[in-house]
Amino acid sequence: MREDAFEIAYRLLDTELIDSDGRRCGRVDDVEIEGDPGSPAQVTAILSGPDAFSARVPRPLRRPSSRLFGDGLVRVPWDAVQDIAEVVRLKHRGEELGLGSGDTAAARIVARIPGSEQ
Amino acid sequence: MTKYLQIALGVLSAIGGFVDIGDIVFTTSAGALFGYQLIWAVVLSVVGIVVFAEMSGRVATVTKRPVFSVVRQRMGFGLGLVTLIGSQIVNVLTLAAEAGGVALVISLLFNVSYPALVAPAFLCLALVIWITPFNWIERIFGYLGLGLLVFLVGAVHLHPNLDHAAAGLVPHLHSSATYLYFAVGLVAAGLMPYEVYFYSSGAVEEGWKAPGDLKLNRINAILGFGLGGILSLSLIAVAAQVFHPIGVQPEFLGTSMLGAQASLGTAGLILASVGILFAVSGAAIDTCFSGAYTLAQFLGWEWGKYRHPQGAPRFTITWMVLLGLGLVIVSTGVDPVIVTEYAVIGSVVALPLTYLPVLLIASDPTYMGTHVNGRFAKAVGWFYMGVIAIVAVAALPLLIITNAGSG
């Protein structure tokens, strides 16, 4: 169930994303929040990918982090969230949301090794 | 009922994690140098690893999240990244040491030159991981690693001095820096973080579910690591009886095997070699998977040996790369035993950052519901955080002062 109010940093940030097929497809690396000063803010999207987490590390570490993990950012609209429990479940398949694309590239390499499909 | 016999995960985590090359080296050296005086350090580390393995297995069973997922969740990205980098460096060093140890044991068994065996040993490990399903890896390496029980038989056969052994249960903190170095080494070798990375990920791989499998988790943690502790104590006892009186300072893995030969003859030597071979191979596989588990869990990739290689391709590529890095390290000709010592001492950096989030999540009713830590588990957990903090602070200075235990 999607709750209306919860602690974002405690419950949402850094949680695992699971798509509608039950595949792990990333983490909540950052959260997009909209709202004007003085009025209630609303979570509008989950951000996932190296660009999102590299922006969160202390400044001197940002460049090494993006060097190490590469770049890329996927914006998952809040409407695509099914529920938040110990993981964040999504309503759609990861591919449809643009998540887990690194696995698609890696799968092509692994497919060349004999016996990779058993 | 058969579920209660499924302790292969605990046995492999313990045989391949607790009683790995680092533990074999440290216990044999400690027994040879100090007799029974350091038994307390082994007991301290066994109880610690049982407590944290049970906790991490319980968290994995209840929340479906293994340790590194919890590390990222609770410590945030920055501290999580520090833990990841620290534990990956230690993991690769340990992997190199264990796989080098595999080559070393085979070279001792068949009297073949060691350098020629390094690449084949890594190739064999890669093939085993590629071909064998997870539950068979557990069974083959966990149960054949039980060949190490020969050290228990050997220890009993040598009529250990029980008075000295009992006296060794009490720490003597007034002693030399070398003594303290080995105490810290024994505690650290027993608590190496990759053991809980592997164990908790294994619990998820096996699909353990609360509340039914919580008992299974407890039995695995207590029996598996308890057995590991008994084997470590046996190694100390054999070394204390055989090497301590004559003042041999073991520097080679082969010395541990000779201890079994001294008490039980050739059969003892062969059984000990087989036990060490499978325990060390199991540890190589443990560390290899642990490295891939931690990276995948930190970044939210699909992971798991239970998915076929194409089902978790980045995970698959990661363990292959780690194995390759291990091969590069061993190929430089560095002595696996030295690498082990540095890996064990280096692991203390990752210790607090690994075990603290496990303790925090296991004590958090939001995540754990009714399976949250009780007062006793919490108290023991915080006691061990204290132990870990002391070990973490003391390890590096002691390594430098004692020149890695060589005085």
Image (cartoon, rainbow, N blue to C red):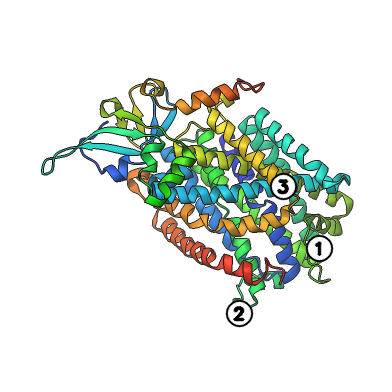
Of all chains, the one bearing label 3 is B
Residue at mark 3 to residue at mark 2: CA–CA distance: 38 Å
- Give residue B297's mark: none
Residue A29 higher or lower than B80, as above or below = above
Q: For mark 1, name the chain.
A: B
Give the CA separation, mark 1 to mark 3.
36 Å
Q: Mark 3 is on which residue type?
A: Val
Q: Quick one: label 2, few (<14), some, or many (20+) residues within 10 Å? A: few
Q: Which residue is nearer to you in this view: A20 or B212?
A: A20
Asked whether the residues under marks 3 and 2 belong to the same chain, the reply is: yes
Mark 3 / mark 2, whichever is N-terminal? 2
Residue found at the far left of this picture? A38
Identity of the residue drawn at 86% across and 46% down:
B113
Q: Are marks 2 and 1 on the same chain?
A: yes
Which of marks 3 and 1 precedes in the sequence?
A: 1
Looking at this view, is A36 or A17 the one in front?
A36
Residue hosting label 1 = B158
- Chain at tag 2: B
Type of residue at label 2?
His
Horizontal and vertical percent for residue B373?
40, 52
Label 3 belongs to which residue? Answer: B330
Residue B144: x and y in percent read 73, 41
Q: Is residue B293 above or below residue B381?
A: above
Q: Nearer the viewer, residue A91 or B240?
A: A91
List the residue tagged with mark 2: B174
Residue A10 placement: quadrant: top left
